[in-house]
Each structure stands twice: as C-alpha cells, then as structure tokens.
Amino acid sequence: MTDAASIYHVENVLLVAIRDNITDTDIITLQEELSHRIVSDGARGVVIDISALEIVDTFVGRILAQLSSIARLLAAETYIVGMRPAVAMTLVELGMDLSGSRTALSLSHALRSLRASRLA
Amino acid sequence: MSITSLEEVLKILREDFDDILQQWLETQREEGIRRPDLFSDSESYRQAKNLLTAFASGMTSASQEGRPNLDDPSWADLRAVLEEITHERVERGVSAGEMATFVLALKTPLFMRLRNNLKDSPDALVSEISRLSRMIDAFAMRTNEVFIEEREQIIQRQRDEMMELSTPVVQLWERILTIPLIGTLDSVRAQEVMENLLNSIVEHRAEVVIVDITGVRVVDTQVAQHLLRTAAAVRLMGAESIISGISPKIAQTMVELGVDVGEITTRPTIRAALALAMNRVGFEIRANKESARD
C-alpha cells in the first residue's frame, strides 16, 4: 500500500482516498492494488475521493478514467467524488471530461447512488 | 516688437483678464454650449476662470518656439485643471463637441483684442493670430483626448460592473441552483460563469443546476461550446446540469450548426426545468386541492 492513497473496504464498496502529494508512480501502484482488491474483496462499487487533489494533470486524469474502465470490466461501478472547482475547470480545459466515470458531490452521495442501484 | 512672440497676447491676458473671462463665457452662451441645465453660473465661472488662469500662466512660461507641446512641464497646471474639468463635464453628460467648442470659444475675445491692439501692424496681427490659433487648437485637441480617456474609463468600469451583475447564481430550492444568462456569452464571461457556478455548487452542496439561456441573444457554435464545457465541469463536480430556455428558434439553429448536447438534459422553459430538478432531488410539485384550475 502506498502512502499517497488509502483503500478501505466497507460492505461491498472500496473507498479510495487520494492524498494531495500523489506522484505518478504512486498512482500506478494504486491502479495495480485497486484492480486486485476489487477481485479479492468482491467489490461491486468503487468510490474515489479526490477532494484533497488541488491539481490534476493529464496523466492523473487519464489514470482516473482508466480506473473506471478497469473497475467496469471487473463488474464494479466507479464514482469519482469531491472534485474541486479548479480541478474540474482544468480537466474540461484539457478536454478530459471523464465521460466513462460517474461523479458525485461527496462520499455519501456516491454511497446513496450505489445503494439505489443495489450495488452496495 | 518681435513678430514671432506672443507678447501682445500675453499683455492682453495680463491686463484684460477679467474682461476676457466674461467675454469667453458670453461666447460660450452664444455658441449654445453653456448648459445651464448641467452647470450653475458660478460653476461655469469657476471652471472657465481656473482654465484661463492656467492657460495664461502656461503661455507665460512655455517656450514659444516650434509647435505647441502641451506635454511640456510648463503646461502641467493646465493639464491638471483640464483633467479636473473634463472629469466633471463627462460625469454630467457633456458631449465631445461641446467640450471642444468650450475651449475654442476662447479665440473670439482674444482675437478681437488683438485686432484692436495691432490695427496698425498687419504682419504682427497675422503672426500673433496664427500662433495663438495653433495654441488654442492644440489645447482643444488635448481636451478631446482627455474627454475620450474619461469615457473609456467609464466604459471599462461599466463593463466590470456588468460582468459582476451578469453572472448571479441563485439558489431556487435546497440543492437546486440556477444561473440565468443574459446578453452575449463570450469566452471571458463563460469562464466567469463557470467559476461562479462551480464554487456555488460546493457552497450550497447543489445536486442540480439549471443554466437558463432565455436571455442569451445568439447561440452560435462558440456559445454552444461554452455551455457544453460548463455542463461537463458541473458533471465532474458530481452535479447534474439542465439547460433551460431553449427556444424553438435556438433549437433549430443548434441542430443546423450540428451541435450535439450529448447526455445533457435540456428543457424549453425554466418552469419545466424546475419541475424536473425538484423531481431529481426528491420533491414533487403538486396542485393544492383547493386551488382552482382552468
């Protein structure tokens, strides 16, 4: 497990909290780790909290999009939550609208949506 | 008497200052630019007196060689007075033409005196008049420049104010925001709209935002792009956007332009959008039993 992100398993959902100082290596490690955990924990939902991130570049943006695609292949639905306005504007500017991922205002919003779709 | 100097003019200004001032004001009245509706007699008098004083002192100290140069330090007084007066006049709605005539009217009393005093030396008369004329023309030109600068500042200020006024985000209900867009949506404003909207989403924990474009005059490809980008950013934040106020005409234009709104929900009226938004956050709008419907 890296220091830059923590994964918690709650009910059928994996909660991922990404810290502000995450590096490119860290996030690749996270992608590995998360893929394994989805299968080993039998998770049906993944919630990635990025509220700590003040800057998101194309690399991190692409990995976030990839995480959602990977999770979908492993039968889990991904929610990206807590994006800051400045980050949202940057991503749109970069043309990355993460159209493959679901988004929610906060962790509880995401959990509510997951419960509504009976995944949690 | 030297022909190239403005000695005679200086002498007249020194000796006849009060009379010239009176006649200048008189000429302004004859030219129809006194504007008693905007300025009282005492204000007009004060403005003209300050200007004439600064003009006279500038004439005395400034070099008489070459073209009149109002940027010269000896004209600092005049520039300051001019700026102050122009500021007062622009604020009250005096036009550029009136402003120039105001200054040019100074020629009449000065020329009349020159003609009387230099009756016997036509060469000196012509020379003084032509120099003085250039002087006052430069003076009037500078007045207009200052006038335009003042106007530009006012325009800039109003633009800034309009910018602030034109992107108000309003909370319609718990977790529902609306931003009514009015006028033209250029890149600068689109950026402003997006920033305001995203920050308000965080502040109000909003789940649905209604972007109302009823008041947007033209929707071209660029405006459509701005709207789509705003909607994309709203989605990234985890909220949903509804674009309302799409008139039949705008709908046709958008299709003709090949604008694809993708998965963004659109509604023709803000009323329909509100009903949908309420539904999304778990409320329902229902008619009261007693309320009569026709």
Image (tube, coloured by chain):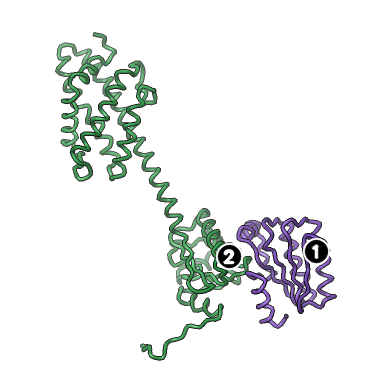
Chain colours: A purple, B green
Tag count in the figure?
Answer: 2
Does any portion of residue A67 appear in the rendered image?
Answer: yes
Q: Decide: is B287 above or below B218.
A: below
Q: Decide: is B291 above or below A105.
A: below
Q: Chain of mark 1?
A: A
Quadrant in the rendering for residue A114 = bottom right
Q: Nearer the viewer, residue B217 or A21?
A: A21
Identify the residue at horizontal 43%, vertical 58% (top origin): B165
Which corner quadrant holds the C terminus of chain B? Answer: bottom left
Label 1 secondary element: helix
Which corner quadrant holds the N terminus of chain B? Answer: top left
Q: CA distance from mark 2 to mark 1?
A: 27 Å
Quadrant in the rendering for residue A79 = bottom right
- For mark 1, what is the residue? A30
Q: Is residue A59 left or right of residue B20?
A: right
Assess disc 1: are there few (<14), some (14-19) or many (≥20) residues with their C-alpha within 10 Å of its C-alpha.
many
Q: Decide: is B272 above or below B13.
A: below
Residue B88's spot in the image, x, y percent?
Answer: 30, 40
Amino acid bearing label 1: Leu
Assess disc 2: are there few (<14), some (14-19) or many (≥20) residues with their C-alpha within 10 Å of its C-alpha.
some
Residue A7's spot in the image, x, y percent?
Answer: 78, 68
Contact flag, marks 2 and 1 (Cβ < 8 Å)? no
Nearest to the eye among marks 2 and 1: give it.
2
Residue B157's spot in the image, x, y percent?
Answer: 41, 48
Q: Which mark is residue B202?
A: 2
Quadrant in the rendering for residue A117 = bottom right
The residue lying furthest to the top in this view is B1
Label 2 secondary element: helix
